[in-house]
Amino acid sequence: MKPRSGIEGHGDTLIVTVMGAIRQQIGARSLTPGAKLPSIRAFAVTMQVSKSTVVEAYERLMAEGVIRSRSGSGYYVAAPLAPLSLALIGPKLDREIDPLWISRQSLEADDTLLKPGCGWLPASWMPQEAIRRGLRTISRAEEAALSDYGTPRGLPPLRQLLARRMGEHGIKVSPDNVILTESGTQALDLICRFLIEPGDTVLVDDPCYFNFHALLRVHRANVISVPYTPAGPDADAFAQALTEHRPRLYITNSGIHNPTGATLSPVVAHRVLKLADQADLTIVEDDIFADFEVTPAPRLAAFDGLDRVIQIGSFSKTLSASVRCGFIAARPDWIDGLIDLKIATSFGGASLSAALVQTLLMDGSYRKHIGALRQRLSSGRAETAARLKAIGIVPWIEPQAGMFLWCKLPDGIDAADIARRALTDNVVLAPGNAFSLSKTAGGFMRFNVAQSVDPRVFTTLRAAMKGAERRVS
């Protein structure tokens, strides 16, 4: 293709475009201080502009102090290391369907915004009175418990309790091999810091929890995905990915899968573990939705005995997102390294949150809350599915438990378009491609049944779909 004209016509616009491309690479840390820029000829070809346009762009960047030239050598990045910009890492995404954008809209929302696309329960569904009683109980603790740093491993009685709870799922673990964290996200972050380097390949499900994508982007991982089926990851695609990409980690949910609500079958679990053993693959099993289950699904950690499987979880979804308490259960020879990383990144543990969780688990409040919550979610799934079907949106499967419905929109309707339209009516939705690394879920959407009780959600959906249909026709 012939290069577009240089400085004449829209030349100034082209110069700004070239400058923006360089700034984007610096912001994404593809170009770091001292890195050599592409030659004028090469970048002109890449940007499809004239060489004079690139020369002018480089001159302006030098005037700003962003780059510098070396006689006979070329141009180099001169600016200090730019602050990390997640929005500039990887492909440029529409911010209205970017996972971080969805999270920010949900987290920053006021009471006027409906959030069927968010990933947590409404405050009114949480055990508020039990939490207040628990806070009063721990307020009477010794001064050290209220003021000092927690131990790096975390509160011993809670770790013992977590080990017993995991034993109920067939996972045999010593309390000494359980580390408390401030959240499930911190647990995963510590594991990534411990096990992977920038450029290492990590395998995820497609679709999967969208913050896996965001966190792995922070760690500069090469992320590969495999299709997820109602019984677990597609085993043939999983085997092919291991052969072609040699990933270091595989991150998944085995209990209730996010976003699909599917559960892992024993047959698929055994094959995944066999393939992982052959490929020397470590698996991170996020079990954050375990307490929503009525009949527990198979756990990779139980079959594996925490040899190459690490299990993580938290109480953010079932108890309180304000009470930051998660955990890691891992093999003994990895514990010291993970503890060192925890000290380096957050120092002591969140002992007050851990004490509150332990109090609620021990006094019977949590057990009663979970029993009622399972029934409420069961009704919510049925009611939400019926309302969605009435407007042509069909669940991919009928989940056995949990808060999510992964749904197929009518043919020809783009979920991102629906999400943009719904946002103008103060409804935050979760379009499918936010969960799909391959961007093959454009016709899907995840609904949180606990956040979908307001009839305005379905009125807005119906109107948005009609608008999208008119645009298509």
Image (cartoon, grey):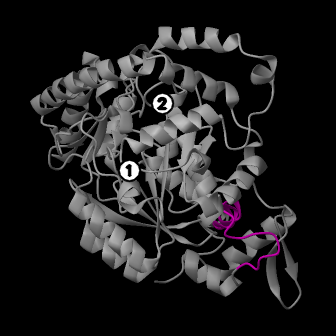
Q: Which residue is mark 1?
A: 253
Residue drawn at point x = 62 percent, y = 11 percent: 137
**Tag 1's secondary structure?**
loop
Task: Name the amino acid type tagged 1.
Answer: Asn
Q: Which quadrant holds residue 10? A: bottom right
Q: Earlier in the sequence, mark 2 or mark 1?
A: 2
Amino acid under disc 2: Ser
Q: Report if the CB atoms under discs 2 and 1 are less than 8 Å apart.
A: no
Q: As displayed, is residue 15 above or below residue 453?
A: below
The furthest residue to the right: 71
Q: Is residue 467 above or below residue 441?
A: above
Residue 113 in view (yes/no): no
What residue is disc 2 on?
106
Relative to the observer, which residue lies in front, 106 or 21?
Answer: 106
Q: Which residues are magenta?
A: 18-37
- Judge whether residue 135 can be spotted in this image: yes
User: Callout 2 environment at 10 Å: few (<14), some (14 to 19), or many (20+)?
Assistant: many
Q: Quadrant of residue 462?
A: top left
In the image: residue 39, left or right of residue 186: right
Q: Residue 42 in the image: state x and y as whole percent.
A: 63, 85
Question: Foreground mark, 2 or 1?
Answer: 1
**What is the CA distance from the residue labelled 2 to the residue labelled 1?**
22 Å
Q: From the viewer's side, name the closer residue of 404 and 35.
A: 404
Image location of residue 203, percent across then percent down:
43, 66
Q: Residue at x 80, y 23 (%)?
A: 144
Q: Position of residue 82 (x, y in %)?
A: 76, 58
Write the residue at 25% across / 47% down. Answer: 262
Q: Secondary structure at mark 2?
A: helix
10 Å crowding of disc 1: few (<14), some (14-19), many (20+): many
Q: Is residue 289 left or right of residue 353?
A: left
Q: Using the image, determine if residue 174 lies above or below residue 4.
A: above
